[in-house]
Image (spheres, grey):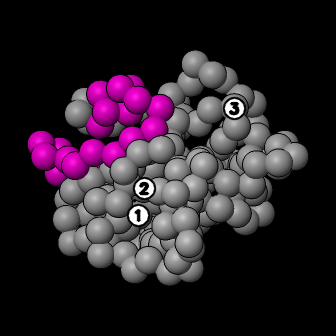
């Protein structure tokens, strides 16, 4: 459990995300976020690899996971394609079976069978001290989340929100 939480960014596991994480996609090697403004979620994370199209890479430092089968502190790359790009979207590159963030990989995160009706989510979490965490929410665990979080996740396939009422996740 993480305490206290200030914001979450989520991506519902759709078929493209499932295929990417399970190495079933011939072309997509990233988790596509959306054409949204995620810049405020990542405030204070340095922009690197600037492009002429206004794109950049963020090296998001993820705190270690200390639960069962711990994961060491790591850096997650997040890419914004740029305001002048044709796509203008955000993605998390290199998210294949062997390169994805460990808590999102098959067997630990994404399942082996895609179910479009399941409530499966990739989360990036920012705590009140500004530190980032990453988790996978399995369908079986969805209803245990605070109601505020469930409402956010159900409202949109991809998004981010500040958390006001909930102090833990």
Q: Is residue 157 magenta?
A: yes
Q: Residue furthest right?
A: 26
- Residue closer to the observer: 4 or 11: 11
For disc 2, the marked residue is 124
Q: Quadrant of residue 111?
A: top right
State which mark lies toward you, 3 or 1.
3
- In this image, 166 relative to 154: left or right? left
Mark 3–mark 1 Cα distance, whole angstroms, equals 24 Å
Q: Which mark is residue 133?
A: 1
Residue 143 locus on image (x, y percent): 38, 28
Residue at 82% across, 43% down: 25
Q: For label 2, count other residues whose C-alpha is less than 10 Å away and answer few (under 14), some (14-19) or many (20+).
A: many
User: Mark 2 and 1 residues: CB-CB less than 8 Å, in contact?
Assistant: yes
Left or right? Give the position of 65 relative to 42: right
Q: Which residues are magenta?
A: 149-169
- Residue 18: percent from left, percent from top: 70, 39
Q: Secondary structure at mark 2?
A: strand
| Residue 19 makes an appearance in the image | yes
């Amino acid at each position: 459990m993480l305490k206290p939480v200030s914001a979450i960014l989520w991506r519902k596991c759709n078929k493209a995300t499932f295929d990417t994480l399970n190495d079933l996609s011939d072309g997509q090697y990233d988790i596509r976020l959306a054409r949204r403004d995620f810049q405020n979620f990542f405030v204070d994370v340095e922009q690197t690899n600037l492009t002429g199209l206004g794109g950049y890479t963020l090296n998001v430092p993820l705190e270690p996971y200390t639960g069962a089968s711990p994961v060491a502190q790591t850096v997650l790359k997040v890419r914004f394609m740029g305001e002048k790009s044709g796509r203008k979207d955000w993605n998390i590159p290199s998210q294949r079976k062997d390169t994805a963030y460990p808590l999102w990989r098959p067997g630990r995160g994404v399942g082996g069978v895609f179910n479009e009706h399941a409530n499966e989510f990739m989360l990036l979490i920012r705590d009140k001290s500004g530190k980032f965490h990453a988790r996978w929410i399995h369908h079986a665990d969805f209803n245990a989340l605070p109601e505020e979080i469930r409402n956010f996740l159900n409202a949109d396939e991809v998004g981010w929100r500040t958390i006001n009422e909930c102090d833990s996740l």
